[in-house]
Image: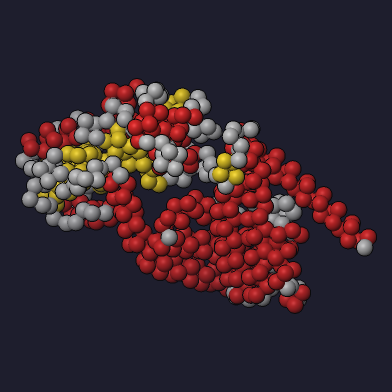
């Protein structure tokens, strides 16, 4: 792959739309289902993923010639786990208030498929700068998808958005429970792909 | 063969670099994290003390389960004694005195206590169980007691701080640390759940259960104390909102019945055991020749 093909904008739109981790790649669906009952949960998990994705992408891309082909998967896992633990300890010491909010999410990230798949597919074959923006795009795309799912579920399940009361009652509590995550993601995924096809057809016609 | 060595060496170097980085960050942050946790604990306790009457000091009692080679299991208490310093009171599970040993080292955090206990009781293995913190005024009168313990949650330990009044009734519950699911079990942190425990007497706690009923809206408004001011509720009105429900069972969090039940059981167990154990400690410490500082 030639690094010059990757511009900042191309990487960001790739992560947000073209290869959106949730709606297109369908990776890391487990946290996406479990953690999206509110917008805030989606945002915090997205933030944690964004940081670890960017840091791991950059690390792997810097050392990509050093890491032996046969042991790249364990090497990636070590790199991800190191960044997760470093951010966990640093936040606990220097941002205790914020850490209290985000601690639950940070610890989950080691096993996210999206992170290791970007290391394998992109960062191990590209230079540092495109890898950095690939991490940004994927992290933001993950955050965007989680917040969108969170919006739908929080509004339908609790009648609130970001904890602010919109409806004075809870329309369908079902939407707050984990199984509803599958329905919410399925519905939004279908809409997402339908809109993209419409857009591509419209652009092809012009 | 050469390939095999190169792979092993490659992975070894990666692991070493990672371990060095983790070790560096850990040594730089661990003490700060401990200080943060201590500050948070003290802030949590402060919320249950009368702000006009400053406590003269806290007396900290740490309970240990003791394993001694070739002997029956025992219970040990690290106690502050009059005139400064600490002692270790070793009891049988039935409350018979086995020994009382003065401790010569610091006992402030768990690692320090482990080292001090290992010196005082060579050969025995001490397993930390929980801590009791008594807030005493200048004349040694007990203003409040705090139980720092843990209970099994939905996934792993939930670390609790239970505040008790001088009469043993619950003043409040704080969740110090937990890993329950956000949006479901993690709601145990919320005031509408925690504050349901406030005001429960010892007798009520013995029979306290959990019901799966929706939380009445006025009860919720009464429980959410930090929002009283924003909602124009005076403290009297807030307490009046809670009054009709304050002696019912705990209303489980919707979608997190197991977490609610485990925390309720944990509070009951911790409080009832605390009362019983304090009685035992107070009656046996003097018999063992100790002068406890509480």
Which of the 4 quarters of the picture holds residue B270? top left
Is A88 or B228 nearer to us in this picture? B228
Is A47 or A73 nearer to us in this picture? A47
Determine whether B152 is above or below A42 in the image: above
Asked if residue B273 lies left or right of residue A19, the reply is: left
Residue depicted at 93% across the width and 60% down the height: A205
Residue depicted at 66% across the width and 43% down the height: A152
Residue situated furthest right in the rendering:
A205
Determine whether A107 is above or below A132 in the image: above
Q: Is residue B274 visible?
A: yes
* Residue A111: percent from left, percent from top: 58, 54
Which quarter of the image is occupied by the N terminus of chain B? bottom right
* Residue B121: percent from left, percent from top: 17, 49
Residue depicted at 8% across the width and 37% down the height: B286
Which of the 4 quarters of the picture holds residue A10? bottom right
Residue depicted at 17% across the width and 56% down the height: B105
Which quarter of the image is occupied by the C terminus of chain B? top left
Which of the 4 quarters of the picture holds residue B191? top left
* Residue B87: percent from left, percent from top: 13, 47
Asked if residue B226 lies left or right of residue A17, the reply is: left
């Amino acid at each position: 792959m030639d690094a010059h093909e990757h511009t900042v904008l191309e990487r960001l739109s790739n992560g947000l739309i073209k290869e959106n981790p949730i709606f297109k790649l369908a990776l890391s669906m487990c946290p996406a289902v479990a953690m999206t009952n509110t917008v805030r949960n989606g945002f915090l998990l997205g933030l944690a993923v964004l940081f670890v994705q960017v840091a791991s992408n950059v690390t792997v891309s810097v050392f990509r010639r050093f890491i032996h082909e046969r042991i790249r998967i364990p090497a990636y896992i070590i790199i991800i786990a190191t960044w997760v633990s470093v951010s966990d300890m640093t936040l606990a010491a220097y941002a205790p208030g914020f850490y209290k909010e985000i601690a639950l999410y940070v610890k989950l990230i080691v096993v996210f498929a999206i992170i290791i798949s970007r290391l394998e597919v992109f960062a191990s074959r590209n230079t540092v700068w495109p890898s950095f923006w690939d991490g940004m795009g994927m992290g933001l795309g993950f955050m965007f998808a989680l917040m969108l799912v969170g919006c739908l579920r929080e509004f339908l399940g609790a009648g609130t958005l970001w904890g602010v009361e919109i409806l004075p009652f809870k329309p369908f509590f079902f939407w707050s429970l984990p199984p509803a995550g599958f329905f919410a993601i399925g519905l939004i995924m279908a809409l997402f792909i339908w809109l993209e096809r419409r857009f591509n057809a419209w652009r092809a016609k012009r | 063969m050469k390939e095999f060595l190169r792979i092993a060496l490659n992975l070894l170097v990666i692991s070493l670099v990672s371990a060095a980085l983790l070790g560096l960050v850990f040594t730089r942050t661990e003490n700060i994290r401990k200080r943060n946790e201590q500050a948070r604990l003290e802030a949590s306790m402060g919320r249950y003390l009368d702000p006009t009457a400053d406590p003269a000091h806290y007396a900290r009692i740490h309970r240990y389960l003791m394993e001694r080679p070739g002997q029956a299991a025992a219970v040990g208490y690290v106690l502050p004694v009059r005139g400064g310093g600490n002692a270790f009171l070793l009891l049988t599970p039935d409350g018979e005195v086995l020994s009382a040993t003065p401790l010569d080292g610091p006992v402030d955090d768990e690692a320090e206590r482990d080292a001090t206990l290992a010196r005082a009781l060579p050969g025995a293995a001490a397993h930390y169980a929980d801590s009791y913190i008594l807030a005493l005024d200048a004349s040694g009168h007990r203003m409040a007691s705090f139980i720092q313990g843990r209970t099994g949650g939905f996934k792993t330990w939930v670390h609790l701080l239970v505040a008790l009044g001088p009469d043993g009734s619950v003043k409040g519950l704080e969740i110090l640390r937990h890993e329950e699911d956000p949006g479901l079990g993690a709601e145990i942190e919320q005031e509408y759940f925690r504050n349901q425990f406030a005001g429960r007497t010892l007798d009520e706690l013995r029979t306290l259960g959990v019901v799966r009923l929706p939380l009445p809206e006025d009860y919720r408004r009464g429980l959410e104390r930090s929002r009283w001011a924003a909602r124009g509720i005076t403290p009297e009105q807030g307490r009046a909102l809670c009054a009709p429900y304050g002696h019912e069972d705990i209303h489980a969090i919707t979608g997190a019945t197991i977490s609610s039940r485990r925390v309720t059981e944990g509070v009951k167990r911790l409080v009832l055991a605390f009362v019983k154990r304090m009685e035992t400690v107070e009656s046996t410490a003097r018999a063992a020749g100790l002068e406890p500082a509480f």
